[in-house]
Amino acid sequence: MRLASFLALATAAAGISTANLPVVTRDVAILGGGATGTYAAVQLREQGKSVALIEKKPQLGGHAETLYLPDGQYINYGVEGYFNNELTKSFFAQLDVDYELLLPGSMLTKHVDFTTGKTALPASGILDAGTGAALYRAAIEQFDYLATGAYYLPDEVPEVLLRPFREFVDAHALWGALEIIFTFAENVGDLLERPLLYVIMNFGIPQIDALLQGEYIRPKNGTGELFDKAANYIDERNNILYSSSVISASRTESGVELVVEHSQTGKCTLIRARKLLIAHPPTLPSLTAQGFDLAREEKSLFSKWSHVNYYAAVVNATGLPDGFNIANTDPSNNPGHLPLPPFLWQLEYSGVPGYFMIKIVGPRNDDTFTAEAARELIVQNIRAMGQAGTFATTPGEMQIVAFASHTPETLTVDVDEIRNGFYKRLYALQGVRSTFYTGYTFCTDYSTPLWNYTGSVLEMMDS
Ligand SMILES: Cc1cc2nc3c(=O)[nH]c(=O)nc-3n(C[C@H](O)[C@H](O)[C@H](O)COP(=O)(O)OP(=O)(O)OC[C@H]3O[C@@H](n4cnc5c(N)ncnc54)[C@H](O)[C@@H]3O)c2cc1C
Ligand SMILES: *[C@@H]1O[C@H](CO)[C@@H](O)[C@H](O)[C@H]1NC(C)=O
Ligand SMILES: *[C@@H]1O[C@H](CO)[C@@H](O)[C@H](O)[C@H]1NC(C)=O
Ligand SMILES: *[C@@H]1O[C@H](CO)[C@@H](O)[C@H](O)[C@H]1NC(C)=O
């Protein structure tokens, strides 16, 4: 049977008639227009391949989100910076994006216990970022197979990687480095209790070397500029389906057929492609909602993720003093005085007077920590600082001027699964039924190593 007729039958079996749908034929269909899906689309176009990029939201960028203010200033309240290396710079050059060094909005930090609102003592012996990162780097250097950012683990996974991070901190006297580690890996949640592997995957050799060597860079006009220019390069009118999701999918070894629905108009398009790249977290609920014909192995693997609900916000008119970051500090959690989920990581001074950025981390696998709960926590924490007399806060006037959900974030599996070869099985899915994967479930959650990993996936597609 010819592929097309087989796929038509399969789609019909799913209860959707494809007979009268407009048909789009492409070399590669990409699901998700965040950092990785966008990068893939640009590189495939560069190679002369045709693409269809399907993005659920009305714009590209995913975790990269920029608030543009009326006076031309901007706040990157999602992704703030990219590694200052050849890969980032050549991607920026390809898109004609001007860049600058990323400088923090402020180097000054006040420590406050956000639950009481009172000034709190930071943990004693905190090392400066460079010294802390170098000390920690020396301790994790032995896991050199993780240095690309992918989960390329040995068959026998060293037990130390599966033990709580607390034990590694004690064994290597890393107490003074906890603040810098948490700055990068706050999204893992209860840092000391999480497996060492997941701490390294969020702050490992790639992130440290970028920090110590060339620092981080950002597009001169916000991360939004990168994605606007990428959309232009991809030819958005013809190749990007915004506000759209797959509602039915059939896949064989020779290609895929997807029915894609626009969320507002309900208009459907049939996409036929030789290859499919999934560039959003491949969770069971997400793929089931998209009508995927999952094989047993796919179901088995994708059902194992746990995640954190994670939000980011910008607030203004808080009454907090400009020019300081306010770090959430829990003096009862030792070592490190790090807050426990759910928490606001910091009130991070944005560099724009009056505006602070916030990252909000929920408890692992707790979907009751909704956007509403995160907003309430912001108000509660800032109010407590006023009530304690720490700052003259103005919760009544405060505005949450931007708010984004990044859920599901920090997808991980139980240590037993890792021990039993989860990641090997996961990578073995690459290419099965013309389907490939990229994004932060397959590689460390940082754009530059994700782009590098995505490049290697595009090579697999070709072979
Ligand atoms: C607040 C925050 C700050 C960060 N800061 C940095 C930083 O400074 N530097 C850095 O390098 N990294 C940072 N990161 C990590 C960041 O996640 C990665 O750098 C990178 O942006 C992830 O890209 P991705 O393509 O894997 O995923 P995403 O950016 O999440 O992209 C996935 C895309 O898929 C779309 N999607 C989801 N489901 C579907 C569906 N069913 N159909 C179609 N589309 C779908 C989503 O809308 C999204 O656009 C930060 C992350 C967060 C949350
Ligand atoms: C980029 O990816 C390739 C292929 O996986 C890998 O060999 C290389 O080491 C990676 N580069 C970096 C800097 O991680
Ligand atoms: C910066 O980007 C914003 C949003 O895309 C745009 O409105 C503005 O014109 C850009 N500014 C410059 C100087 O390019
Ligand atoms: C806060 O932000 C809102 C929305 O951008 C704006 O209308 C308001 O003027 C800002 N308030 C202050 C005090 O900057």
Image (spheres, rainbow, N blue to C red):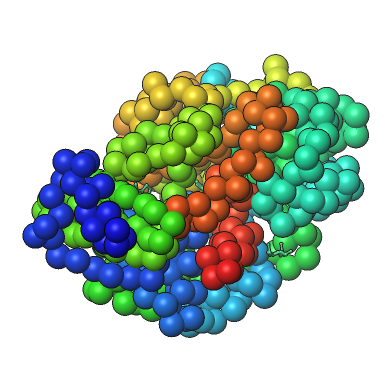
Instruction: Check the image and report above or below for 35 versus 236.
Output: above
Question: In which quadrant of the rendered image does the N terminus lie?
Answer: bottom left
- Residue at 14% x, 65% y: name it: 22
| 219 relative position to 168: left or right | left
Q: Residue furthest left?
A: 20
Closer-to-camera residue (166/295) = 295
Q: Residue at x 59, y 78 (%)?
A: 90
Identify the image quadrant of the C terminus: bottom right
User: Could you say which is closer to the camera, residue 323 or residue 256?
Assistant: 256
In this view, the residue in front, 27 or 59, is 27
Relative image position of residue 110 (x, y in whole percent): 64, 38
Q: Residue furthest front?
A: 1
The mark total stands at 0
Counting from the top left corner in percent of width and height, residue 240 is at 30, 66
| Percent of width and height locating residue 414 | 63, 26
Q: Is residue 451 visible?
A: no
Left or right relative to 113: residue 20? left
Q: Taking the image as drawn, is residue 230 in sight?
A: yes
Rendered view: 413 above or below 221: above
In which quarter of the view is residue 155 placed? top right
Find residue 200 and report its horizontal and vertical position in percent: 73, 42
Q: Is residue 191 left or right of residue 230?
A: right
Classify residue 83 by image quadrant.
bottom right
